[in-house]
Structure formats: C-alpha cells, structure tokens
Image (cartoon, helix red, strand yellow):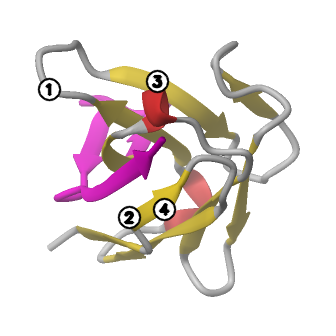
Amino acid sequence: QVQLVESGGGLVQAGGSLRLSCAASGLVFSLYIMRWYRQAPGKERELVASISAGGGNTNYADSVKGRFTISRDNANKAVYLQMNSLKPEDTAGYYCNALRRDIVPIRDYWGQGTQVTVSS
C-alpha cells in the first residue's frame, strides 16, 4: 500500500520560512517524479514544484521561483519543500504527489496534505 505523509505545515508570519516534508512508503521511490501542489479555498489546485526521479531536474511555478526549493532523498524516500520569504498568498493546503508515467497504467499517488497559513 502506497502512502505519502506530509508534515511541516503551520502558521507563520509573512517573510518567514517553513520546510515541508513528505515521507513515502510502499513504492520504489527512486522511480517516481515527485511534485508539490497547493490548493487554496475556492481556487484550483496548483503545481508548485517538481523534481525528477534522480533529483537532477527541478521546476517551479513562477509564483514561487527564487523563494521555494524542492529536494529529495531517495535513500530515505522523502521529498522536501523549503519555503522562504513566505507571503500571505502562499496560504494553502500543500500536497505531495508521486508520479510514474513510464509504465501502464500510470501510477499517481497523493498525500493527505498539510496546511500552510501565512499571516500578514
């Protein structure tokens, strides 16, 4: 059974930092693209950052470039999102996603999310 468990969310003042973690189990972690999404109330889910299976390639939404950093530890089956210079508009539920699209059917797993609230 695949599980993705996020942690590290919380309440922080604008300008502060948080580090989100996602612990994976039940899958061959090193074969999966890992992504962080977020969703604010009344808004669509947004892809925040992604990292390739080997960790060599990362991508970010324009809204977080230069402030957020995604990283992974394949040995410990974990992915992280370091969030600096947080803004109130970063307030959202943050979700970890594991994607493997080189096989059929595609494998696509989600965590339960962790809430990030940034106060002004």
Q: Amino acid at mark 4?
A: Val
Q: Specify whether 93 is left or right of 120.
A: left
- Mark 4 → mark 2, Cα distance in angstroms: 4 Å
Give the extent of the magenta segment: 98-120
Near mark 2 (Cα within 10 A), the count class, few <14, some 14-19 or many ≥20, is: few
Which numbered tag is attached to residue 41? Answer: 1
Q: On the image, numbered disc 4 is attached to which residue?
A: 12
Residue depicted at 37% across the width and 39% down the height: 91
Residue 94 in the image: state x and y as whole percent.
35, 47
Q: Note whether 17 is above or below 54 in the view shown.
A: below
Q: Which of label 4 and label 3 is nearer to you?
A: 4
Q: Note whether 48 is above or below 113 in the view shown.
A: above
Secondary structure of the residue carrying numbered label 4: strand
Q: Is residue 60 magenta?
A: no
Q: Which of label 1 and label 3 is nearer to you?
A: 1
Q: Note whether 120 is above or below 47 in the view shown.
A: below
